[in-house]
Image (cartoon, grey):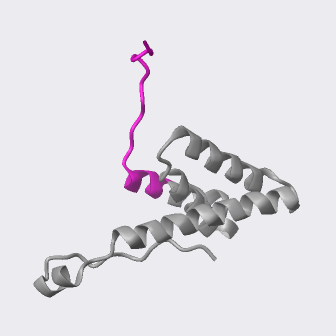
Amino acid sequence: MKDCSITILHRCRSHIMKNAKSLCKKHIPKHYRFGMHVIGLLTSANSMVELEEMVTSATVVISSPCVGENVEKHFQNIKTMLAFLGDLYLVESKVSAEDQAQGSCRTPGAAASFD
């Protein structure tokens, strides 16, 4: 039987992103947008395996002193994960024509994009 006495911290995504905004503006103003996208990506992990992949790629990109093949590979991995989240958001937020006609739907927000 697994130990059930482990404390798991929980914070809502909006509070995480609010703190991320101030940290990114303070510590990486030239790469603010990238930092916000990476932190947003980290909040979307559905498993420890996904989180580990995201953290590994972010760590390689952020901590490398120069651009190389490995950095490019991990940067592309981050972009792929972000693109997948954007596509997933669009699929999940599509509204049927019937819902639109009845006016019972909310307008979906813009999906995350990354240049």
Residue plotted at (47% across, 53% down): 44
Q: Is residue 103 left or right of residue 22?
A: left
Q: Quadrant of residue 111?
A: bottom left
Note whether 109 is above or below 15 in the view shown.
below
Quarter of the picture containing the C terminus is bottom right
- Picture quarter containing residue 25? bottom right
Q: Nearer the viewer, residue 57 or 94?
A: 94
Residue 8 vs residue 31: left or right? left
Q: Is residue 40 visible?
A: yes
> Which segment is the magenta one?
1-19
Residue 103: give x, y in percent of width and height: 13, 83
- Relative image position of residue 46 (x, y in whole percent): 47, 46
Residue sitting farthest toward the left: 102
Depicted 57 relative to depicted 95: above or below: above
Instruction: Identify the residue shown where x is 44% and y is 21%.
Output: 6
Near-viewer residue (22 or 70): 70
Q: Residue at x 67, y 67 (%)?
A: 31
Is residue 111 inside the magenta stretch?
Answer: no
Is residue 17 within the magenta segment? yes
Tell me, yes or no, if residue 25 can be seen here: no
Please indicate whether residue 9 sits to the left or right of residue 24 in the image.
left
Q: Quadrant of the N terminus?
A: top left
Image spot of residue 53 (x, y percent): 64, 47
